[in-house]
Image (tube, rainbow, N blue to C red):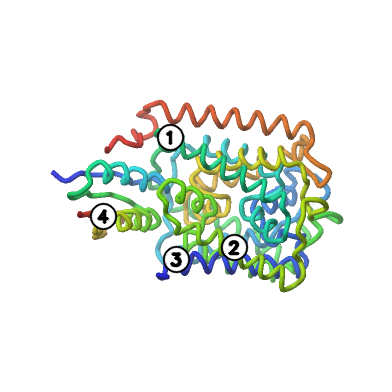
Amino acid sequence: MNGKKFLVVATGGVLGLLSVYLVKMGNPANMGYCIACFLRDIGGGLGFHRAETVLYMRPEIFGLITGAFLAALVTKEHKAVGGSSPLLRFFLAFAGMVGMLVFLGCPVRAVLRLAGGDLNAGVGILGLIAGVFIGIQFLNRGFSLGRATAQSSVNGYIFPLTAIILLLIVLSGAVVFFASKTGPGSMHAPVLVSAAAGLAVGVLAQRSRFCMIGGLRDFILFKDTHLLWGFFALLIFALAGNLAVGAFKIGFAGQPIAHSDGLWNFMGMLLAGVSVCLLGGCPLRQIIAASEGNTDCAVTIIGFIAGAAFAHNFGLAASPKGVPVAGQAATVIGIVLVLIIGFAGAYRTSAASGGVKLGQNG
Amino acid sequence: MDKMVDARGLLCPEPVLLTKKVIDNLGGGVVRVMVDNNAAKENVTRLAENKGWGVEAALEGGEYILTLKK
């Protein structure tokens, strides 16, 4: 195993083990990390939605951003770039988040749920793979978000520095933001533990380019297993950890913060899969890239938070009781819109995209 | 003239896709790929090496020029 592959495996392994530990320390079950859930909680903590049970400024996310930012600074990889279809990215993130909240988790949590014995997550992961497969068809036919260009350096600092300021406020213990008194939002590891766990994964993920979607995509596209190693490392280490602490419980019914409606677990993650495949990376990878100075990815994160707020303000998000009809409708509408974007992007040649048309050089 | 692939400003997987189309079509020769971030450099290098191409990287003004030979 070469050094780079080791880093990918280490990132997945540390992410998996820390997830089990964070649950032990107070995070909701099978939710040591969940980028979608945590961004939704942060959206609630900031008051963009007021769903009483999911309001909390998750320090893991701010730690992730800080860790990736510092790692990028040290390795001189921090660079302000942007201008590659920011609004389109915002929309794809928004739609993808609705899908993830219908399933109840991002790709990372899907694997963590499976590692906890939640077989509904297996159905979700099949949906995710189907979504990535569809996304790849658009990529192969020329879908491109276009070129980013260098921006003045201040652009690249806004996202990570905002996160660091928010982290400092949270660490200070000042009661500034909204926080749940009941439900998943009220369940959390001690703030310092969460922040440190985020920081560690942020550094590793920045160095390794760890990406859940990248693992599936590169395997299907190029038969390249490099990033897929991380996907499996996450599964195996989290599974081993759960078995060790007795947190493994196999089945479909009664799984923590999950529902057993197979159709919508599949469809929600299919929507997420197409969206993030077109975005070029899973929510975790988007956070890392935004921390490295990519302002398009920062806009993507804002899209995720906006999508989560919308999903909770208008009753689209699932709960352990199931998926509301509005959420089912939103998933179908989301899939249709994302497919339209895929087709439109794949079959037009646009000078406005910077002239990027896959195959133009071929 | 050597084949050029301009993948500057693109995030993965696009640099790899662009490169793959070119090297699959050529089968051999010299291809120069321009990228401007380390992730793209690593991904293109991995693809080319997996397909049996030799890769040399040169840094020029914050951008990499990868020379692929087979």
**On screen, residue A244 above or below A60:** below
Q: Where residue A347 sits in the image (x, y, percent)? A: 41, 26
* Residue with the mark numbered 3: A5
Residue A224 shows which numbered tag? none
On screen, residue B44 versus residue A183, left or right, reads left
**Residue A223 shows up from this direction:** yes
**On screen, residue A35 above or below A273:** below
* Residue with the mark numbered 2: A234
Q: Where residue A346 sits in the image (x, y, percent)? A: 43, 30
SS at mark 4?
strand
Q: Amino acid at mark 2?
A: Leu
Neighbor class of circle 2 (other Cα within 10 Å; few <14, some 14-19, many 20+) is many
On screen, residue A238 versus residue A78, left or right, reads right
Image quadrant in which the C terminus of chain A is located: top left
Alpha carbons under labels 4 and 1: distance apart: 24 Å
Alpha carbons under labels 3 and 2: distance apart: 14 Å
Alpha carbons under labels 3 and 4: distance apart: 21 Å
* Residue with the mark numbered 4: B66
Alpha carbons under labels 2 and 4: distance apart: 32 Å
